[in-house]
Amino acid sequence: MATLTIRNVDEKVRKALRKRAAENDVSMEEEVRRILARSVGPSEENARQEKRRRRLDALRKVGANPVDTFDLKAISDDIWNARTL
């Protein structure tokens, strides 16, 4: 783990961090770590869009015209597996 020192933090920001940390029952240091991790990690919206894309791809795969014989079990298995993405 690395150490990060932040200088010249505005007093209002420090008080807001202290209040927020107290509301979450954690130290200010832990609250800042959580804020930083959320800000640089993948956003929830990006995760939702990726999940939608995978579902759409699975639906396209299932919805394609069959080239061989029609196998209802294989199609239902594909649909079931796509739900677990």
Image (cartoon, rainbow, N blue to C red):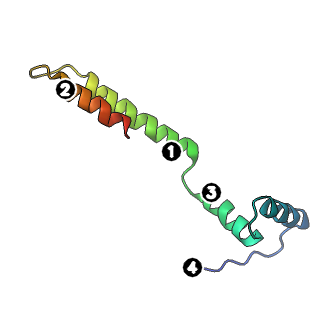
Residue 47's disc number: 1
Outermost right residue: 11
Residue 73's disc number: 2
Q: Residue at x 73, y 72 (%)?
A: 29
Instruction: Please name the amino acid that badge 2 sits on.
Output: Lys
Q: Locate residue 31: give its quadrant.
A: bottom right
Label 4 near label 3: C-beta < 8 Å?
A: no
| Distance between mark 2 and mark 4 Cα atoms | 51 Å
Q: Residue at x 25, y 26 (%)?
A: 76
Which numbered disc, 2 or 3, marks the residue closer to the eye? Answer: 2
Instruction: Please name the amino acid that badge 3 sits on.
Output: Arg
Instruction: Tell me the crowding category of disc 4: few under 14, some 14 to 19, or many 20 or more residues within 10 angstroms, Cα based.
Output: few
| Distance between mark 3 and mark 4 Cα atoms | 17 Å
The N terminus is located in which quarter? bottom right
Instruction: Please name the amino acid that badge 4 sits on.
Output: Met
The spot of residue 57 in percent (x, y) is 34, 32
| Distance between mark 2 and mark 1 Cα atoms | 31 Å
**Which residue in the structure is indicated by mark 3?**
38
| Distance between mark 2 and mark 3 Cα atoms | 42 Å
Q: Residue at x 12, y 22 (%)?
A: 67
- Secondary structure beneath disc 2? helix
The spot of residue 9 in percent (x, y) is 83, 70
- Secondary structure beneath disc 4? loop
